[in-house]
């Protein structure tokens, strides 16, 4: 009889959801110190607070930022990789309840160490999930999940085609950034279904995009695309200004496939870093408070793409944006990027 009662109590206890902890410990690993990553982090912290997990009250966070400068050559990149792995070991030793990884390199090169130690991982500011080892755009894999900036090139180029109906050839200058490389590869395949050819040039992160841009202009591109690429942010967007110095005299418009800190593009299409950080916070709250397994949570994306327009840039290029875009877009000058 006693044994039956004991079995019943065990079964009853197992059926009751775990109570929320009194305090939580999160470690954050980030590669590159750029403004968009700060916005993602802010969104993450705010969403945790919305779920009762408040920094300074019942939450302790340690944020580790590994610098990755624009002039990183081969040996520096190896050094960055070693720093990621070393810091990941330190984080494992601190035994946090969860790790937030910010950026593709931070996630790609550290997640396996955390997962093997049984620490849940949530990522943010990742544009192409498959590039960090996810099973698909919507499913991460055992031990981790997150929120993605993923932008389907078909959706992006359809909007670009609305603004620039005669567009048949677009140029893109990018670096070896994982997000940028993956986007360009997918864009070349998918843009072709809309009658658009994408020509690209890859440059070193320390190089100016001007020479590559002039080469693409000589090949007849009618517009330029700016992908999510740390190359543009690492030097305070100086490469975008150098790119515009080539495009503006030629009257060639640009379309930015992200929301970052520069003006001059006719159109900005993509997800907001702060919103993506907030979605990652939603995932983290479910793991911490409800005991959800990361692999059971699908990768989250922003439901509707945010579209911004630069009306002055459009006017300077002689482009009349259609009402279909103006009705749903915001003026870039009124939004903090």
Image (spheres, rainbow, N blue to C red):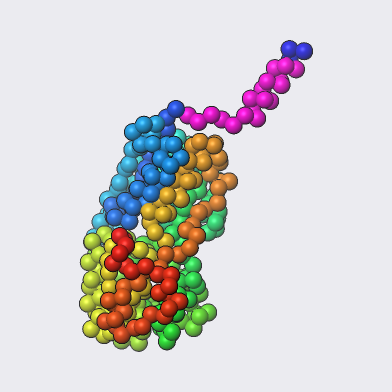
Q: Is 11 contained in the magenta span? A: yes
Whether residue 294 is visible to the viewer of this picture, yes or no, is: yes
Q: In this view, does 281 lie above or below 227?
A: above
Q: What stretch is highlighted in magenta?
A: 4-21
- Residue 295 placement (x, y as % from top left): 56, 46
Q: Is 10 contained in the magenta span? A: yes
> Hey, which residue is sitting farthest right in the picture?
1
Q: For the point 33% across and 33% down, which residue is it? A: 56
Q: Quarter holding the C terminus?
A: bottom left
Count of numbered labels shown in the rendering: 0
- Residue 302 placement (x, y as % from top left): 47, 58
Q: Which of 84 and 307 is in front in this view?
A: 307
Q: For the point 49% across and 45% down, which residue is it? A: 283
Q: Main secondary structure of the magenta part?
A: helix
- Residue 196 placement (x, y as % from top left): 46, 81
- Residue 87 placement (x, y as % from top left): 34, 41
Q: Is residue 12 above or below residue 271?
A: above
Q: For the point 49% across and 37% down, which residue is it? A: 288
């Amino acid at each position: 009889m006693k044994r039956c009662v004991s079995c019943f109590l065990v079964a009853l206890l197992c059926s009751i959801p775990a109570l929320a902890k009194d305090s939580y410990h999160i470690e954050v690993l980030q590669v590159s110190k750029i403004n968009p990553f700060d916005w993602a982090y802010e969104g993450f912290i705010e969403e945790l607070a919305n779920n009762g997990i408040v920094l300074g009250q019942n939450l302790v966070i340690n944020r580790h930022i590994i610098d990755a400068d624009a002039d990183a050559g081969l040996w520096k990149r190896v050094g960055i990789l070693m720093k990621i792995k070393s810091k990941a070991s330190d984080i494992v030793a601190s035994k946090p309840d969860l790790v937030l990884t910010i950026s593709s390199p931070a996630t790609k090169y550290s997640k396996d160490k955390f997962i093997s130690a049984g620490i849940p991982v949530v990522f943010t500011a990742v544009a192409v999930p498959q590039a960090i080892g996810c099973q698909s755009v919507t499913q991460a894999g055992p031990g981790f999940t997150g929120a993605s900036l993923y932008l389907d090139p078909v959706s992006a180029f359809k909007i670009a085609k609305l603004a620039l109906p005669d567009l048949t050839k677009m140029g893109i200058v990018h670096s070896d950034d994982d997000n940028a490389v993956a986007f360009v590869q997918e864009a070349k395949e998918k843009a072709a279904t809309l009658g658009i050819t994408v020509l690209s040039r890859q440059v070193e992160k320390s190089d100016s995009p001007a020479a590559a841009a002039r080469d693409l202009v000589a090949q007849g591109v009618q517009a330029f695309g700016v992908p999510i690429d740390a190359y543009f942010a690492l030097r305070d967007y100086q490469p975008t200004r150098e790119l515009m110095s080539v495009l503006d005299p030629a009257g060639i418009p640009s379309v930015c496939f992200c929301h970052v800190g520069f003006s001059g593009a006719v159109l900005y299409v993509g997800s907001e870093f702060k919103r993506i950080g907030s979605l990652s916070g939603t995932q983290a709250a479910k793991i911490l408070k409800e005991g959800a397994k990361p692999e059971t949570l699908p990768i989250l994306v922003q439901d509707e793409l945010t579209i911004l327009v630069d009306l002055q840039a459009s006017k300077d290029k002689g482009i009349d944006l259609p009402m279909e875009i103006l009705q749903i877009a915001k003026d870039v000058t009124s939004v903090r990027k």
